[in-house]
Amino acid sequence: MQEIKINLKDNSYSVFIGDLKNLEFGSKVAILSNQKVAGLHLKTLLERIKAPQISIISVPDGEAYKNLKTIEQILEQMFCSYLDRKSTLIALGGGVISDMGGFAASIYERGIDFINIPTTLLACVDASVGGKTGVNNAFGKNLIGSFYQPRAVYCDSAFLATLPSRELRAGMAEVIKMAVMFDKDFFDYLVNFDLSGDLAGFYDEIINKCVRLKASVVAQDEKENGVRAVLNYGHTFAHVIERQSGYGEFLHGEAVGMGIIMANELALRLNLLSLDDANKIKACLARFNLALNYKIKDANAFYNAFYLDKKSANNKIKFILPNGKIGSYCLRDDIDKSVVLDVLQGLK
Ligand code: NAD
Ligand code: GLY
């Protein structure tokens, strides 16, 4: 079991990577999950939890249900379970469950403890760590939410054994994002690792690496006033893709893969990336069967959707781009609209 500390001004906590240990609570616990994940993994979790009362809260599965209506349902079930301010909500599932669980915990009686037990690769490497919680609405992805840190995160890659390969691949987009932005050696590891054998060790390694990278970013900038925005590489584009396609056609990670390609097109235009490096990143995404081409129908509409991006302020759109090489990043809010539009037109 590895322990990685998320060091914050207040509310520091640990991410534990390895076999899920026994968890003991002095107060009531509710486990939030969906039918699919609960059917596969709830029994394992229940065998490890000791608490005076354990209730199960189930929500419909999928990004399409990551909204305020589902939050109300979660809160209702929390009230029906008589949770109090000493209770803990455990989110067992992927990023949709941890984002909604964290948000519900943050507003239930002005905030109760929550713990993340991620069961997707994407949630292990990114969503379960760092305290961004929230839901989507008609205006965009994750536009309603809070920064609310979990008390602890338990990443046990054994849960990934039941994850469909499409979901595993989608998780790899966030892993590649981390590598391209922060760590060339890690990128080379992803490019060169022999994927033909048993991948259990590979997943443990990349979860470890990504959590360490994210821990360092979140410790520097918990509320995204600076470097944390770099974790949004590819996402400015991906969020528009997800919204335009109704949060159903593409998995979040797949949209991120396409968004990385789009961000790189912009970086190429600005001479922030060599064609060689852009091709290496494309090949790395392709290695994990990512980076489909997304055909932009209306470049102006796509551009206008950027204004709803949470990084935009004072009518300036912020782009996260590589900065000259793999493993290096920059934040740019000074890119001429005509340049961006021209790149988007080229992606039609
Ligand atoms: P998800 O939560 O929808 O899970 C993907 C699918 O896999 C679901 O159908 C789920 O029921 C199923 N599943 C989960 N675990 C399983 C398992 N072990 N075996 C079989 N099936 C399993 O999707 P996701 O990719 O985990 O997360 C995407 C969400 O995470 C998005 O909403 C995104 O916005 C959010 N996110 C948040 C952060 C953050 O920092 N808060 C970071 C990245 C992504
Ligand atoms: N996944 C982006 C962040 O946590 O900031």
Image: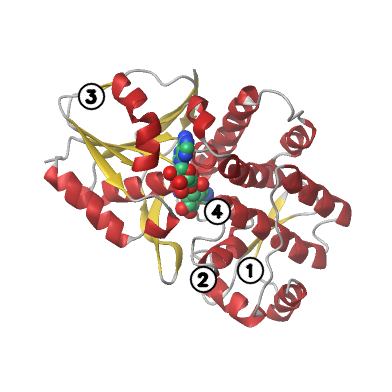
**In the image shown, does 295 or 8 lie closer to the viewer?**
295
| Residue under numbered circle 4 | 251
Q: Dot 1: what SS?
A: loop
Disc 1 marks a residue whose amino acid type is Asp
Compared across the picture, whether 73 is left or right of 295 comes to left
Figure quadrant of residue 258: bottom right
Q: Quick check: marks 3 and 1 in contact, CB under 8 Å?
A: no
Which residue is labeled 2 in the image? 313
Residue occupying the point 51% across, 36% down: 124
Tell me where residue 263 sits by quadrant. bottom right
Give the spatial CA distance, label 3 vs label 2: 43 Å
The three-letter amino acid code for the residue at tag 2 is: Ala
Which residue matches tag 1?
333
Quadrant of the frame with the C terminus: bottom right
Measured as percent of width and height from the top left, residue 97 is found at 38, 45
Cα separation between marks 4 and 3: 35 Å
Q: Which of 121 and 154 is in front in this view?
A: 121
Numbered label attached to residue 275: none
Mark 3: C-beta under 8 Å from nearest atom of ligand 1: no
| SS assignment at label 3 | loop
Disc 2, SS: loop
- The colour scheme applied to this rendered structure is secondary structure
Q: Residue 109, can we see it?
A: no
Residue drawn at 42 percent across, 59 percent down: 64
Q: In this view, does 266 lie above or below 161?
A: below
- Side of 331 where 146 appears, left or right: left
